[in-house]
Amino acid sequence: MDWLLRTMSGYADRPAMVVGESVYTYASMLDNCREWADTIREHGIRPGEVVSLEGDYSPSVCGAIMALLANRNIIVPLSDNVQHRHDELMDIAQADRSFVFGATGPEIRTYARSGHSGLLAEFIREDKPGLILFTSGTTGVPKAILHDFTRFVERYKTPRDTMRTLTFLLFDHIGGLNTMFHTLANGGTIVAPTSRTAAAICALIEKHRIELLPTSPSFLNLLLLSGAYGKYDLSSLRIITYGTEVMPDSILQAAYRTFPGIQLRQTYGLSELGILRAKSRASGSPWLKLGGEGVETRIVDGMLHIRSDTGMRGYLNAPSPFDEQGWFNTLDEVLTDGDYIRILGRRSDVINVGGRKVFPVEVEDVLLQMPEIADAAVRGEPNPLLGRVVAAVVNLHEPLDPKTLKARIRSFCTGKLENYQIPVKIEIRQEHLFTERYKKMRK
């Protein structure tokens, strides 16, 4: 942690973060960190205590993160969209304190705990700073992922490009944290959005001359559908990175045509392993190569396995997923072409139709080529004869009778998909088909 603070001090007069109309330099960010260090001492927060940080990107949040890590605490970032599960997550993380960042300023709350147990107790005895993230599933109990923060932050020691970056991904997401630490370690500027609509993001790109936009395929589709990109000057944008879910080829090619001067780079990461170094075969290509220092990959039974030096210590509330040699099964099914892979989707999303595999993204890719369909989410539904059949939920550009739509879908998909891949159940919805994290909702 000391090396990061020293690095940031070398950029003292540079702008580190922009929030609304306010610009904060690296010097002011470090002042914020020192103020939080004083607050931590005043409240008697001891090393090893688990502290949640509840809010969004701001100099105060970043200062608190760095001060807590320097104090060898275990931090638990929580964004607003998980507040409905707040008490459950706090219990799983065994949190001792909360720093709540609201409109009237930060509030510190203390919880009565009799101590810590299991893997967390073992980790605390090592007297190291830690990080707890939660898996982002919408159903079931989320898994709490424990990282040794000293190892987690090592990857940012290697100097990289310095860019003005928009923090699109939330700060309790592995991709959002990667954006924050990568930018601060390289003297770049973070621009934090207060709204993540297509128009708001385009306006920020124009106003602050954003160079790097890390986002998701679902947001790129929304951006393309909105037409907002044509109403603002996006000429500063050099790179769009996309990850968190599988990219349908139709969206990727549409983005490639719409933004010919912007590099489109696929990223890959997991909360359990962090963000890996990834190299796209070309801008607009769905094929990528994974690697980097301390990272190994292999394909077993069509699934990607990874072994990484920066992997998590384990789950707080679930068995370890690593095998005896330290390999982690990502459960992502992939195709291979030499050193490159193409991600098809999670095995849990695969629809088994009479013993034949259907990958939702393959069907979504075809549906998104239809002029009637704005967005599509494909899933399996039970069938007494075949086990599962393909069902699709769609957003339409214009109202259409369901019976007519179903006939058009079958006609359009014939010849592009196998018969068993064509959706037999169709549902039309007005609501977006992605979560607050702009990730496709299939469940």
Image (tube, grey):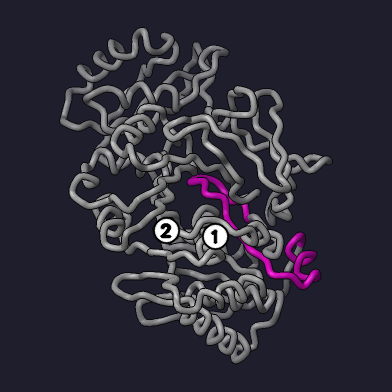
Local secondary structure at mark 2:
strand
Occupied quadrant, residue 403: top left
Percent x, y for residue 181?
A: 55, 63
Residue 82 lies within the magenta run? no
Percent x, y for residue 7?
A: 59, 72
Per the rendering, the mark at residue 230 is: none
Local secondary structure at mark 1:
helix
Question: In the rendered view, does 441 fall on the left or right side of 154?
Answer: left
Q: Tell me which label, 1 or 2, sits earlier in the chain.
A: 2
Q: Which residue is mark 1?
A: 182
| The C terminus, quarter of image | top left
Residue 132 lies within the magenta run? yes
Q: Amino acid at mark 1?
A: His
Q: Would you place residue 348 above or below residue 238 in this image? A: above
What residue is at 44 percent from the left and 27 percent from the top? 361
Mark 1 nearby-residue class (10 Å; few <14, some 14–19, many ≥20):
many
Percent x, y for residue 11?
A: 51, 74
Q: Would you place residue 383 above or below residue 56 in this image? A: above
In the rendered picture of this protein, how many numbered marks are placed on residues? 2
Question: In the rendered view, does 347 fall on the left or right side of 176?
Answer: right
Residue interval drawn in magenta = 118-144
Q: Which residue is mark 2?
A: 165
Q: Nearer the viewer, residue 303 or 162?
A: 162
Q: Amino acid at mark 2?
A: Thr
**Callouts 1 and 2 close, C-beta under 8 Å:** yes
Residue, far right: 324
What residue is at 52 percent from the left and 53 percent from the top? 175
Mark 2 nearby-residue class (10 Å; few <14, some 14–19, many ≥20):
many
Q: Would you place residue 59 above or below residue 139 in this image? A: below
What residue is at 68 percent from the left and 60 percent from the top? 154
Q: Would you place residue 348 above or below residue 157 in this image? A: above
